[in-house]
Structures are given as C-alpha cells and as structure tokens.
Image (tube, rainbow, N blue to C red):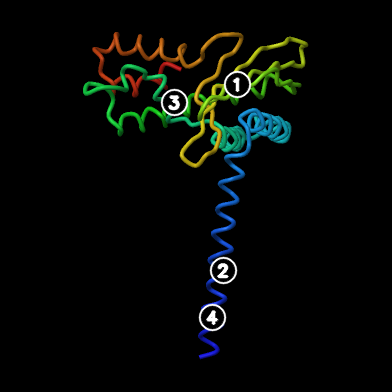
Amino acid sequence: METLRRQVLVTGVFLTTILAALTSAVATAQQISAEDAVDQYIGGLLERMAEIQPLYESDSAAYFSAVEEELTEFVDFREVARGVMAKYGQGPNGASGEQLDRFAVVFRSSLIEFYGSALAEYGGVEYEILESREQDRAANVRMAVLGDDGNRIDIQYAMFLNNEDVWMLRNLYVEGVNLRRQYYSRFDSLMKRNDFDIDRVIDLWQIEE
C-alpha cells in the first residue's frame, strides 16, 4: 500500500512539473515582443551565415539545407504563399487546401534558393532596429541594415503570432517595396497567361525562376 501511495505521489509530482513547464513555455512565448523576436532571429541568422558561408562554394546542398533550417524557424511559408496567391487563394473558385500546400512547398524552395544566394554574396552586415508597432497578434518591426559596401537598407518585417504564440514572418518590405505584392504580380501574370489554371501556374513557378 505504501509503495502504491509513493508511486501515485511521484506520478503526481511528475505531471505537475510537466504542466508547469508547459505553462512557463507558453508564457515566455507570449511575453517576448515582436521586436525581441526579430532581433534574436536576425542576430542568430547572421552568426549562422558566417559559419556556413564557405559551404556555398564547396557544398551547396549542405549550405542551402542550413539556410532552409534557419528560415523555417522564422518564416511561415504557408502564410506567405497564401498572401502571394491573394484573391486566387480565396473563395469557392480559389485554390484548394492541397493546392495551397503544394504552392507553399514550391514557393519555399524558390525563396530559399534566392535568399540563400543573396545572403552568401552580401557578406556581413550590421543592423539597428528603428521602431516596432504591435497591435493584437500582429506587428511591424522596422530595421536599418548596413552592408559591407556601406549601403544602408531599410527593411520592415510584418510579423504575426501563430497558434503556438510564436512570432513568425508573413511579409517583408525592402526600401518600401512590398515583396509579397511583387510575388503576387508574378503569380497574377502567370494565371492570366495560363487560363487561370492554378495547378499549371504552380508547375511553372520554379521553371520560370
């Protein structure tokens, strides 16, 4: 009887500890600001890029795999893909969930290749967060980035809190240019040139990179 009581007590303490840890993790996620999330991510990304940059020439597969791992922690590719599809991803005649998932995979691949190459060629940078505005579960974080060549670039991160209360990127503005809108223009053009066939456009997306 005493052994059973001890086992029940130990189990209760174990479950209580797990519950407390989970509660603490959720609270921590909710407490961190979008500005802090961007700051931590960009700082970590630049450190990681310095480590893997030599792989760009010697082992490109390993390099882009590392880039994908880093970006996946910060970018909600499905949410970005939904924004790129815009009106074509909505309503009864819009993309199905399966088509959205498929486009997110293709779009993710093209983004990783493009930005991975850009990061490898751009070199080290310094950055400064200029301002941050949060409202409900969305935020905009504006940053100034200084490249090796001395050029200053203004970047704005459009963030949102996902279902796990983690800040993720849904859009990016570079020098005032809305990148999601730029990609939408391309998607819209492909749709018009291919009789509004979403599957065909998804197939063509990477071919026309």
For label 1, the crowd category at 10 Å Cα-Cα, with few meaning under 14, some 14 to 19 and many 20 or more, is: few
Image mark for residue 14:
2
Residue marked by disc 4: 7
Q: CA distance from mark 2 to mark 4?
A: 10 Å
In the picture shown, does residue 37 fall above or below 141?
below
Q: Residues within 10 Å of mark 4 (few under 14, many from 20)?
A: few
Q: Earlier in the sequence, mark 1 or mark 3?
A: 3
Q: Position of residue 104 (x, y in %)?
A: 41, 29
**Mark 3 → mark 4, Cα distance in angstroms:** 52 Å
Q: Residue at x 30, y 34 (%)?
A: 98
Three-letter amino acid code of the residue under disc 1: Arg
Q: Which mark is residue 107?
A: 3
Q: Tell me which numbered mark, 3 or 4, is placed earlier along the sequence.
A: 4
For the point 74% across and 20% down, the residue is 128
Three-letter amino acid code at disc 4? Gln
- Whether residue 171 sits left or right of residue 129 in the image: it is left
Query: Residue extending furthest bottom?
Result: 1
Q: Earlier in the sequence, mark 4 or mark 1?
A: 4
Q: Seen in the image, is 187 located left or right of residue 122?
A: left
* Disc 1/disc 3 C-alpha distance (Å): 28 Å
Crowd tier of the residue under label 2, counting other residues whose Cα lies within 10 Å: few below 14, some 14–19, many 20 or above: few
Quick check: marks 2 and 4 in contact, CB under 8 Å? no
Q: Which residue is mark 1?
A: 133
Do labels 1 and 2 touch, CB within 8 Å? no
Q: Quadrant of residue 141?
A: top right
The structure residue drawn at horizontal position 54% and vertical position 59%, both measured from the top left corner, is 19
Contact flag, marks 1 and 3 (Cβ < 8 Å)? no
Residue type, label 3: Phe
- The first of marks 2 and 4 along the sequence is 4
- Of marks 1 and 2, which one's residue comes earlier in the chain? 2
Disc 3 versus disc 4: nearer the observer? 4
